[in-house]
Image: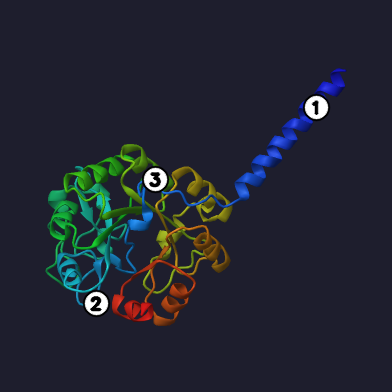
Amino acid sequence: MLALRFNIKYSLLVFISFGLWIYSLTEPKYSPVAMTNESDYNFPAVIAHKALTSGKFPGNSLSAVVQTLNTKVDGIEVDIRLSKDNVLFLFHGDRLEQYTNLNGVPEDCNWSFLKEAKYNGTEEKILSLDDFLSLVSNQKVIFLDIKSNDNLNVDISKRVVDSIKKHKLKETVLVESFNPITLGAIRMYDKEINLMYDFVDDTRASLEESQDQFNKIPWLLKQHWFQKQIRRIIEPDALGPRFNFNRGVLESLIENGYPIICWTVDDYNTAKSLYDIGVTGLQSNDPEIIGAAKL
């Protein structure tokens, strides 16, 4: 009798475990949290990556933002970091010397130091998030790409939420990140803020990208099955896969109803092929070319 009970319990455990495993392999249905009526949300088709619409100005700079605001580009994407004294600012690289005349890790510096930096070969200075949001307001859909050298730092999430609410831009902003902890914290602080989960499966950098930034992405976050679980838990309002993401998986996500915003696409043929399979929008350093592919 004891052996029979053990066999029944063991069989039940195996059955439940198998069921959970099968469930984990299924793609979660698109169920946005912030967008309660997503059919009314106008997702942008062409987004200026780093606020770039030409090579005339540095990415994330004031002049680049102003230039983009005077174009027909649908959306504007910028990179957000947090200074040592808790000021949010726009900057792409992990180190200041990558783009400016100063040295150091941006997050290790106070804003009084950062705001004096000049982008290489220009008089352009680093822009604060507060000034950026005041300038752009609701003129474009805004993508805030949160970057941090500390993957467990949720303070930046809280401050981004506070900044969005301060400028009353909940309906205009999408917050994006590779880091599920960052996105989960945003969701915890305010369920009405739109989230976009960024992910990759191929981490070979293209010419304009830094290989180091891809090397820092943990192995687990590059696995398709794990990305499914993140989508299941966070329930993002949009997805941001890299432009060369597995095409079969990409088409499956589109079939499941997810709005897809791919990055970073700078050539016509790639853009055309992605739009043709149903990708919603593309982030680009050359939005004019991408816009032509959408026509």
Q: Secondary structure at mark 2?
A: loop
Q: CA distance from mark 1 to mark 2?
A: 67 Å
- Residue found at the far top of this picture: 1
Which residue has dot 2 on it? 54
Q: Amino acid at mark 1?
A: Ile
- Of tags 1 and 2, the one toward the viewer is 1
Q: Secondary structure at mark 1?
A: helix
Instruction: Say if 168 sits above or below 136 in the image.
Output: above
Q: CA distance from mark 3 to mark 2?
A: 35 Å
Which residue has dot 1 on it? 8
Specify which label sits upstream in the sequence, 1 or 2.
Answer: 1
Q: Amino acid at mark 3?
A: Val
Instruction: Say if 28 sits above or below 59 in the image.
Output: above
Q: Are marks 1 and 3 in contact (CB under 8 Å)?
A: no
Q: Position of residue 252 (x, y in %)?
A: 55, 62
Which residue has dot 3 on it? 33
**Which image quadrant is residue 57 in?**
bottom left
Is residue 146 in view? no
Q: CA distance from mark 1 to mark 3?
A: 40 Å
Q: Position of residue 153 (x, y in %)?
A: 34, 41
Q: Position of residue 179 (x, y in %)?
A: 41, 49
